[in-house]
Image (tube, coloured by chain):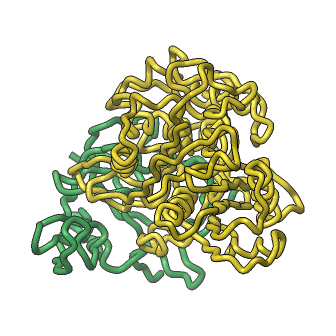
Chain colours: A green, B yellow
Amino acid sequence: MPQRPIEDGLFTWPVPDPPNRAALIGARCADCRAVTFPASPGCPRCGADRMEAEDLPTRGTLYTWTTQEFLPKEPYAGPETAQTFQPWAVGYVELGDVLRVEGRLFDVDPAALDFGMELDVVVRPFTIREDGTEVFTFGFAPAAG
Amino acid sequence: MSDVAIAGVGIHPFGRHKGVTALQMATVAARAALADAGMKWSDIQYAVGGSFEVDNPDAMVAFMGLTGIDFNNVYNGCATAGSALSLGVAAIRSGRYERVLVVGMDKHPTGAFTSDPTGYACPAWYGEMGYFLTPKFFAMKINRYMHDHGISVETLGRVAAKNYRNGSLNPNAFRREPLTVEQIVGSRMVNYPLTQYMFCSPDEGAAALVLCRAEEAPRYTDSPVFVKAVEVRTRRYGAFEVHSPSAPVERVAAPTTDVARAAFEAAGIGPEDVDVAQLQDTDAGAEVIHMAEVGLCRDGEQEKLVADGATSIGGSMPINTDGGLIANGEPIGASGLRQLHELTLQLRGRAGERQVPERPRVGLAHLYGAPGTSAVTIVAR
């Protein structure tokens, strides 16, 4: 089955094996050094337009989270139906002291989530498109030690 | 530069109105505001209409009368009514026009708002992943805020219960059934820690204001209310705002804080002078956060203020006396004008069962919405 990321240039692809750790790809402003994710053509901090691609730290801490307990309407492109939908957790993870990035929280009971817990960037299967392509996306999972 | 008065207010009840279009509701609200001011439609020289769903709010002239006036349409997210009012006030202050109608209307489908993320400077994948949802962000913001400032889930329940109670006293409200804190906290979880009854719903309705030069207000009303300030601001770098795939670690004040400061400065008064406030309560947590962001209290003080009933109609800091968004729902274009309708009644001393004792002198209305836009209006008598 052909595989592809949900968006090119969002995270390292294919995921290197080993070390099997994906990195999100951001951009750093050449002038003020502010970092964006995803890579932005312009700097939201100083307004400059020289941005350089940069891999973000692959481990971070949980800044905040919630649970998504209803099936989102379009443009959500996940595979669930109203019958198969299961709530998921989503949060902002502080990667190094650089940036807080939003993403799905995998492999963890929402009741066990806590502020400051360590999480790693992961890449996971998201859905299978009509043409048979398996789409992968990024998220976070409890740190692997 | 002329000061600006509210000569008349009008509203079409908020809720679900099958078979009634947004433009028809806007016409009802506009005619009520004109009647309140003792004006005719032909007296109006300039109008601003706000809506999310209606392409051309000015099309209401088909029902009002084709007088050929300068009529402009605005949309600015949940702050649409603030932008509409800002334009209407500026038209009088500048001396360009003397009698102005500001009207907001909407008729939304049920369920959380959705849109094309790319229109909000968000990538398409952000929507495909199911992240382009406002309730989810507001839940994450209040979850962290509760952790940082010691706010309990019971406080969220009390805020919503207070707004449903106020809504039960408001014949124009959508939700008129009081709910207990237990019913609210125990209702279906939507986005932890926010439950179903802690959220407002998109709905339908319209509201309108007639504005005039302050000097001429006595011609139209025996109890004029003056617009002391109306300001709109967008987010700065470092604000933690809705529809953000990422957020910088460095934090700055929220757009609500920036806009409230600007409005207080323009009005020449401070938060301690506010007698009654209408705050954007998209959810119960938003009201809690916005209390501090507009400057009515410090972070964390909400826990005791709400428990003590300070934000109830009879309290020291009445908030959302007409039930707010939680009891009225949110027809986006009309929501902020509903707030000004309520503040005008309160300052006139004509809010009936909802009247704040010792007739308030100063009122504050606040709007906040995607992607980090806020408006604050300060009125006084």
Q: Is residue B83 left or right of residue B242?
A: right
Quadrant hosting residue A56:
bottom left
Give B218 or A122, whichever is nearer the viewer.
Answer: B218
Q: Is residue A10 left or right of residue B303?
A: left
In the rendered image, residue B193, in percent from the top left (x then y), is placed at 51, 36
Residue B282 seen in render: yes
Location of the C terminus of chain A (image quadrant)? top left
Q: Residue furthest bottom?
A: A131
In this rendering, position of residue B83 left or right of residue B327: left
Left or right: B135, with B164 as reference point: left
* Total numbered labels: 0
The residue positioned 61% from the left and 34% from the top of the image is B347
Give the answer, above or below, for where B311 lies relative to B322: above
Residue B217 x, y percent position in the rendering: 62, 49
Answer above or below: position of B196 versus B230. above
Q: Residue at x 28, y 39 (%)?
A: A117
Q: Is residue B193 visible?
A: no
Outermost residue on the top side: it is B308
In this view, the residue in front, B43 or A114, is B43
Image location of residue A1, percent across then percent down: 48, 81
- Residue appearing at x 48%, y 57% in the figure: B2
Instruction: Check the image and name the residue furthest to the right.
Output: B19
| Image coords of residue B163 (percent x, y) | 64, 31
